[in-house]
Amino acid sequence: MDGLLSKLRSLDAYPKVNEDFYSRTLSGGIITLASSVVMLLLFVSELRLYLHAVTETTLRVDTSRGEQLRINFDVTFPALQCSIISLDAMDISGQEHLDVKHDIFKQRIDAHGNVIATRQDAVGGMKMEKPLQHHGGRLEHNETYCGSCYGAQESDDQCCNTCEDVREAYRKKGWGVSNPDLLDQCKREGFLQSIKDEEGEGCNIYGFIEVNKVAGNFHFAPGKSFQQSNVHVHDLLPFQKDSFNVSHKINKLSFGDYFPGVVNPLDGAQWVQHSSYGMYQYFIKVVPTAYTDINDHIILSNQVISFSFPLSGYTFS
Ligand SMILES: *[C@@H]1O[C@H](CO)[C@@H](O)[C@H](O)[C@H]1NC(C)=O
Ligand SMILES: *[C@@H]1O[C@H](CO)[C@@H](O)[C@H](O)[C@H]1NC(C)=O
């Protein structure tokens, strides 16, 4: 029996070392500690890599048609008054939005960048109820005011009750307003006065516009724009200023909804004008983007794939 057990014992492939022969060394302890730390780090990093969602990109042909592209912007002009700036958008399909005002807010800012006042750049200022009095002072039965459009009215019963209405009517006709002080409405509202009051102020303009998904441009410029013999013109005369400083800073410029990982390369871009006339252009290419998250929730948006701008703005006179 003893012989059988010792035979079995002799088969042990892993003979145990007697406790007495163990000896713990300092170098052994250091190596154990170091390797444990490394193992832990490797474990954590592998686990993080495993849990991290990878964004996969696939390219597809965009077959959608006639969709709108929303442009969100927030631009600061430190040396251009709010009453002067207007925003136009136009595209190759021939669609134009001149002096866009829907969903656009302007903030007057002082020389130190503090906000003085915010206003929504509402369409056409205040709207009057249906006027009863016609041009030329002919009274019907009520003395509701109906201001003259100075020949720019589209129909006989159109009224231009505010300076803004007159300028808008002029713009639609393609006329320029050379001296707003000669227009009663503007004089009453102190149009020039308000521009003088805002002298030295800047403007922060933010909001969004929706444009067709085709090549086009949108621009901020001083003065109301209008179309004259197929040329896009900005009416600068009413401001009676010699030059405009269109230095600006783009705080935010994005296309469509936010989705994780979107890069808006023009955020933070700025330009300072050094001469008295200036213009600055950015060329941006945008592609439609569908972002699908891990819960299969799809965000339809857009992203900028390339952009460029001239190293220095060119001047014209
Ligand atoms: C003119 O009409 C307005 C409302 O339409 C009314 O409040 C006002 O009293 C009228 N004025 C006169 C003089 O009838
Ligand atoms: C335009 O305004 C910017 C910012 O206020 C300023 O730095 C720049 O010198 C101005 N340019 C001119 C030509 O006055």
Image (cartoon, rainbow, N blue to C red):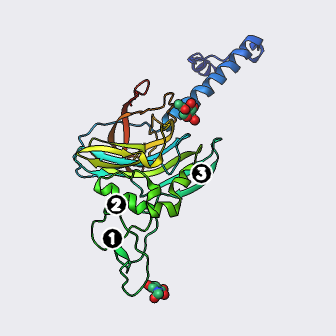
Towards the viewer: 242 or 264: 242
Q: Mark 3 points at which residue?
A: 197
Q: Residue 229's image quarter? A: top left
Side of 303 relative to 196 (left or right):
left
Towards the viewer: 265 or 186: 186
Q: Distance between the residues labelled 1 and 3?
A: 31 Å
Q: Distance between the residues labelled 2 and 1?
A: 10 Å
Q: Name the residue under label 2.
A: 169
Q: Does the residue labelled 3 lie within 8 Å of ligand 2?
A: no
Amino acid of disc 1: Gln
Secondary structure of the residue carrying numbered label 2: helix
Whether pointer 1 and pointer 3 mark residues with C-beta atoms closer than 8 Å, the reply is: no
Local packing at callout 1 (Cα closer than 10 Å; few below 14, some 14-19, many 20+) is some
Picture coordinates of residue 72 (x, y %)? Answer: 44, 48
Picture coordinates of residue 73 (x, y %)? Answer: 46, 46
Dot 2 or dot 1: first in sequence order is 1
The quarter in which the N terminus is drawn is top right
Residue sitting at x 76%, y 14%: 24
Local packing at callout 2 (Cα closer than 10 Å; few below 14, some 14-19, many 20+) is many
Picture coordinates of residue 304 (x, y %)? Answer: 38, 37
In this view, 201 is above or below 46: below
Towards the viewer: 294 or 234: 234
Camera sees residue 294: no
Side of 235 relative to 109 (left or right):
left
In this view, 300 is above or below 150: above
Dot 3 or dot 2: first in sequence order is 2
Side of 27 relative to 163 (left or right):
right
Q: Name the residue under label 1.
A: 158
The quarter in which the C terminus is drawn is top left
